[in-house]
Amino acid sequence: MHLSRRTLLASATTAALPATPPHREHLRTGFERLEADGYSLLSGQRVGVVTNPTGVTRDTEHIVDVMHRDPRVRLTAVFGPEHGFRGTAQAGGSEGRYDDPATGLPVYDTYLKSGRPLADVFTASGVDTVVFDIQDVGARFYTYIWTLYDCMEAAQLAGKRFVVLDRPNPVTGREARGPVLHKEFATFVGRQPVAQAHGMTVAELARLFNGEFLATPVPLETVRMSGWKRSGFYDASGLPWVPPSPNMPTPDTALVYSGTCMFEGTNLSEGRGTTRPFELLGAEGLDGRWAAAANEAGLPGVRFREAYFTPTFSKFQGKTVGGVQIHVTDRAAYDPVRTGIALLVTARKAWSGFAWRSDNWIDKLTGSAQVRTMIDAGAGTDEVTGAWQEELAAFQRVRKGYLLYT
């Protein structure tokens, strides 16, 4: 990591917009502050926006629709990530290139594009400034933060400015948790050495990417929120929750996701195809013994209920499976990554059919082979989580230099 660049980059890349007046205590997003300032950061620029259905105002209007009708903004393009700009595609899909019926704007597809091919998309669009506004959920393997990274890199290659409009981390920004990605395991669910639950906002991540990981920094400006506290969960924001992806229906999903998404790397259902994805976990042959074992682990802030469900798609489609439902009882005490590890450990003991996905996807999700090999060797929750503490502490030290909020 290139720590020598931190002071220069961290001190120079946050846009200086007016502070929230003292009588306005509620949170204001980066977009709200940009609009209130008359879009001065975008003056004279041809603007393209990287966004999806989460890019909305507090009255649920999409920012693209708001900006398109505002004469102070020269909005000329939209860029859609996984699931698409308007959100019509399922996991692993996108909307392709089309003209948006509501605005007539050209929509370009960024999904699975990076480097020079993505830079060519920005060049072809004719924009001068790329704006990013997407709600993240706080987990390293949620792909939108790597869309951010790829777009920053591509914007630099194409000679474009980059502006990030900040939104809350819905599961707080108090601390980072979990293993840190090893570079040899880099994929679209983790490009760089970031903790599994990073505890940062997208603007803070953009600063981290620019200061530590991009070979050449992009001209970056971040429009921070006002009124956001690092200890605040999403329901404290006063903002509407728009599902960032089809299987992220509520803030409760985001709360558990950084731990239970690891079950994508197993042959158990992670609850896709149910109304409670990532909160319901199970498989054929599992029963109440798993919930009992998980509760005996004494994990803080959570209880596990024996549950049975029938996924409508994905693993075990149309079959009734047994497992657990996660009930978070104390959000402040709950550790989603530790809980996910405990559930993996107890599932392996409770069900003889437990197996990792044949492509070792778990290694891509956790960022190394360490979690898989330790659990296979019979390690317990404390031993597995203890193994990443040194690298997590190193990430915490680097992360601290890029935080925008106290």
Image (spheres, helix red, strand yellow):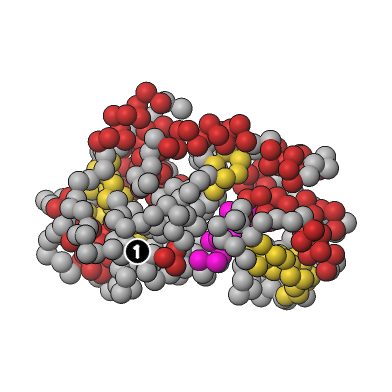
Residue 352 location (% of width, % of height): 88, 56
Q: Main secondary structure of the magenta part?
A: helix
- Report if residue 203 is visible in the image: yes
Query: In the orientation shown, which residue stands out farthest toward the top?
Result: 4
Q: Is residue 258 magenta?
A: yes
Residue 206 location (% of width, % of height): 37, 43
State the count of labels.
1
- Residue 177 to residue 351: above or below: above
The crowd level at tag 1 (other Cα within 10 Å; few <14, some 14-19, many 20+) is many
- Report if residue 266 is visible in the image: no
Along the horizontal axis of the image, is 239 left or right of 175? left
Query: In the orientation shown, which residue stands out farthest toward the front?
Result: 22
> Which residue type carries mark 1?
Gly
**What residue range appears in magenta?**
251-263
- Residue 212 to residue 77: above or below: above
Residue at 44% over, 63% down: 234
Along the horizontal axis of the image, is 65 left or right of 190? left
The quarter holding residue 311 reads bottom right
Residue at 32% over, 70% down: 58
Residue at 25% over, 36% down: 12
Residue at 55% over, 34% down: 393
The quarter holding residue 62 reads bottom left
Along the horizontal axis of the image, is 57 left or right of 360? left
Residue 209 location (% of width, % of height): 40, 38
Location of mark 1 (residue)? 55
Which of the two residues, 360 or 260, is positioned nearer the viewer here? 260
Q: Is residue 28 magenta?
A: no
Along the horizontal axis of the image, is 173 left or right of 307? left
Which of the two residues, 274 or 380, is positioned nearer the viewer here? 380
Which of the two residues, 140 or 183, is positioned nearer the viewer here? 140
Which element is circle 1 on? Answer: loop
Residue 75 location (% of width, % of height): 20, 59
